[in-house]
Amino acid sequence: MNKFTTVFIPLESDNNLWKYLTITSLTIYFFIVLIGYSFLNFFLLSGLIIVQLYFIISKQTESYEFKNNQFIYTFLFYTKTVTFTSFSIKSGEYKDSYKRVTNGRVIELYNENKVVCSIKDIHNKYVFDEILSFLKKNHIEITNDNEFKLNYLDKKISIIGILVSTSLLIFFFSFFIENYNPNKLQEYKTIQGHIAYNPHIDKVGKKNRKKHILVFNLKEYPSTRFILQNDNLNKMNGNEFIKSDHINNSIEFNIYKEDDEYKIKKLTQPYFLSHFNNKNGVTIQSIKYKNLDLITIDTLDKNNEGVLYLSSFILIFLSVYLGYCLYYIFKILN
């Protein structure tokens, strides 16, 4: 029996990388908490966990064991056993996900002229030459001059992709379950008050995609900004509206009931929904001013439904990407 072992992803340069990245990720975590984010934020916690899991998996031993005419590969809970009678060595090209080409070799194990397993130097370079030397001394070699062309995904990218996509799948699946209710009707809360300052127009968004919003401040809610989004700002001709003096005038808004509970009354939000909480203000759904309906609810989109549809799409995309990464992990030995 001959057994060759290596760690799954050897650290080629700095053996203290795990320590450095752990300290860095903890520093970033506490900094983000200090500037106002919850220490229970899912993305912060999963970031810390992903860093640790990556290095834990990287340092796990994978073994290549030859016992008579059997080859046994073991990594964590995965074991593959094949019976072979001969082998061949082939040269060729590996192409990664960025279409970059690398020259390399493949050991193919045969049983009755059928390839039952391939050992690729691109994935197993630290033990590849030892395995090849052992096979040449103890097993029959078949000459094979054919060249190969194989697509592959680097082990590091595969593991990071699996960890990140699994984390995001957990989040969006939980969010979907937490909020999905096809029979739920959108509820609204009426807010009445007096205008504290004249409404003004702000620009929000990225440089190339800036949008205008109309901001209201009410005396009765001094710590809350009420925001009319860009589409409805245009419907009520907001640029003309702000030219007049509105201070101390009474006004009435309709907002989502959830915004009243979570942003004004500061009740505890459902955990996953809280990650989509826009802390910049409460979105106005309708406006009644001086007995005129400036904006009505009927003209508005159901934003919550949009978020659920988006989360459904993301779930599908992440599931496909997770399957893609898992496929290449299991293709290390095919």
Image (cartoon, rainbow, N blue to C red):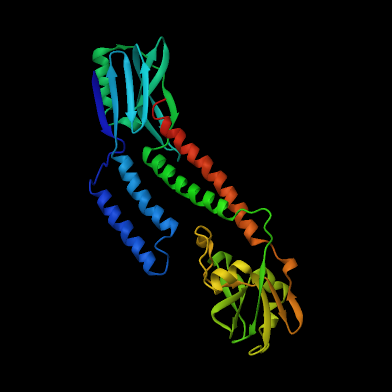
Residue extending farthest to the right is 292
Residue 159: x and y, percent? Answer: 39, 41
In the rendered image, the vertical position of residue 74 relative to residue 22, given as above or below: above
**The image quarter in which residue 131 lies:** top left
Residue 109: x and y, percent? Answer: 36, 17
Q: Residue at x 42, y 17 (%)?
A: 115
**The image quarter in which residue 293 lies:** bottom right
In the rendered image, the vertical position of residue 293 relative to residue 41, given as above or below: below
Q: Nearer the viewer, residue 135 or 50?
A: 50
Direction from residue 17 to residue 244 in the image, left or right: right
Residue 24: x and y, percent? Answer: 30, 57
Q: Residue at x 26, y 28 (%)?
A: 127
The number of discs equals 0
Image quadrant where one finds the N terminus: top left
Q: Nearer the viewer, residue 332 or 264?
A: 264
Image quadrant where one finds the C terminus: top left
Is residue 224 at all visible to an observer of this figure? yes
Is residue 142 at all visible to an observer of this figure? no
In the rendered image, the vertical position of residue 298 relative to residue 58, given as above or below: below
Residue 16: x and y, percent? Answer: 23, 49
**The image quarter in which residue 221 lies:** bottom right
